[in-house]
Image (cartoon, coloured by chain):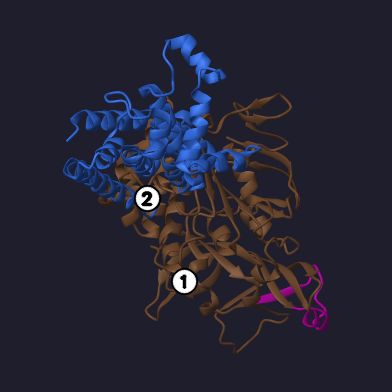
Chain colours: A blue, B brown
Amino acid sequence: MDWQALRLSLELAFVTTLLLMPVSLVCGRTLAFGRFRGRRLVEALVLLPLVMPPTVLGFYLLAGFAPSSSLGSLWQAMFGGTLAFSFPGLVLASLIVNLPFAIQPAQRAFEAIPRDVREAARCCGMSAMRALVRVEWPLAWPGIMTGLVMSFAHTLGEFGVVLMVGGNIPGETRTMAIAIYDRTQAMNHEAAAVMATMLMAISILTIVTALLFSNRIGRPHG
Amino acid sequence: MMLEIAVRHAFEQFTLDAAFRAPPGVTVLFGRSGSGKTTIVNAVAGLLMPKSGRIASSDWTLLDTAQGVRLRPHRRRLGYIFQEGRLFPHLTVRQNLNYGAWFAPKDAPRENMGRIMDLLGIGHLLNRRPGTLSGGEKQRVAIGRALLSAPRLILADEPLAALDEARKAEILPYFERLRDEVNVPVLYVSHSASEVARLATTVVALEAGRVVAQGPAAEVLGDPSVLPVGAREAGAVLTALVVRHHDDGLTELDAGGMLLFLPRVAAAPGSTLRVRIAAHDVILSRERPEGLSALNILPGLIHDVHSGDGPGAIVALDTAAGRVLARITRRSATGMGLEPGMTAHAIIKTVSVAVSDIGGGSACRANSMP
């Protein structure tokens, strides 16, 4: 059992989920209610990581992270290290990969709020901000949580993109999924099996949690 | 408070250009769907920004495009009662009511929560969630939420349209109480002739985005040339006093000195009622008829004979009880030689008056008591 890998996986999942929370709140609501040019295009872009092969996505991210690229050189100028094959690079990659998982359910949840309920909030004397905090968020919460739980579970198991972007550096980029692959390659099936069971248990737990939340989406409003 | 409303807005399909006054009491925007009623209410609420317009009273300006004044919805101090209540589904009834109160300005005159709950009969629902309430209960809570937000004006957009007949009968009296017991003007949207007849202090008749008539309810509803929802729905309103209930299931009323018999009404002797007399339930006779089964015969003077496009004509008859409309065929009108100034008798079958057309409360006549 590679405890270091487990810790790294959980850290990656937590950081990713935490960072995705504001992203899903803002993007989910904007896509649900915003009427702007190019909305469909943004929606399509958000969905792209879902259909792109992980290795292809990882390949392009790796290219983008290279010190010769503008993002890579900016990062190096600001923080010293490289994005590629580092934990921060892994976080950034995992954020992008998980955009559809986090934003889609949040968007659906915001869309499910009846227009009249939002208007009722405004007519009750709530400012747009208060209506958002007091009415929209509580109503969209199950959907937002579903998205975040899905992102968490997905990050724990992500393999292709992590391997491409992070490689297999113990304590830095070797997550559980990579460690399982590593042990299997080394014919250490017992260690791989223990870790696989561990990941499976966490996955089942998160899916159950997600289902509990999603059961509450679209409950009769009003 | 006299609110003056003028709204102009262009849609792809039609243009709204309406101006009217909403005096205290219930002002009903009356018209078919698509006539612009909801657009006006949304402009007053601030949910729709009209191209140009002015919505203001002497000391209160909600919108004045010429002056560049556009109050945001939450600063307008309105209570909006939506078609389907639209309570906040994640909150209990108590929290919904509190949400109405919390966001009102601190110095606003407060309605007493207990009084509102008594008025609407919702005290026993406080800990329930909207999902578990019946349609009628939801609508009552929505009225309470609107009232508790200390509004200067209440907007109600067809608040009964989503309810079945029984629920409508349950909720209408609460709006009558709102009109008679709460000192907040109401702007009420409806396409139902009987709702208008029972609730309206003032009627604003709308057709295709324009105001075709406005004034006291009895006046507008008694005008045979104003038919915002069609001749089939024409009908005048009488104000009558309950005299006594009879053993045979009838209630005797006094309308301007004329006797009226109606099916038993649940109102104590001495109380005032509004009675809508549907025009197609009225028969006209030149002579006073004898040996007739109908109990109500009102003599009067013909004010106007209004012929439409179809086979029908609407005759307006001024009686001691008030203006009565009769919808008869043009053939009859011509055959009887009906003309303004002529005497005639309106015959109204007692059982033809629907219970839903009889409402309690304030007089519908502003100044035309004969």
Q: Residues within 10 Å of mark 1 (few under 14, many from 20)?
A: many
**The disc labelled 2 sits on which kind of residue?**
Ile
Q: Mark 1 points at which residue?
A: B252
Q: State the image quarter where residue A130 is shown.
A: top left
Q: Residue at x 54, y 60 (%)?
A: B195
Viewer-proximal residue, B206 or A40?
A40
**The disc labelled 1 sits on which kind of residue?**
Glu
Q: Mark 2 points at which residue?
A: A217
Asked whether residue B54 is drawn in magenta, I would say: no
Viewer-proximal residue, A201 or A37?
A201
Secondary element type, mark 2:
loop
Q: Which residue is drawn at 55% across and 18% down?
A: A68
Residue A87 in sight here: yes
Counting from the top left corner in percent of width and height, residue B367 is at 64, 50
Residue B77 in sight here: no
Whether label 2 touches label 1, CB < 8 Å: no
Viewer-proximal residue, B93 or B114?
B93
Asked whether residue B341 is drawn in magenta, I would say: yes
In space, the residues marked 2 and 1 are separated at their CA atoms by: 56 Å
Find the magenta span and give its range: B329-346
Q: Do labels 2 and 1 share a chain?
A: no
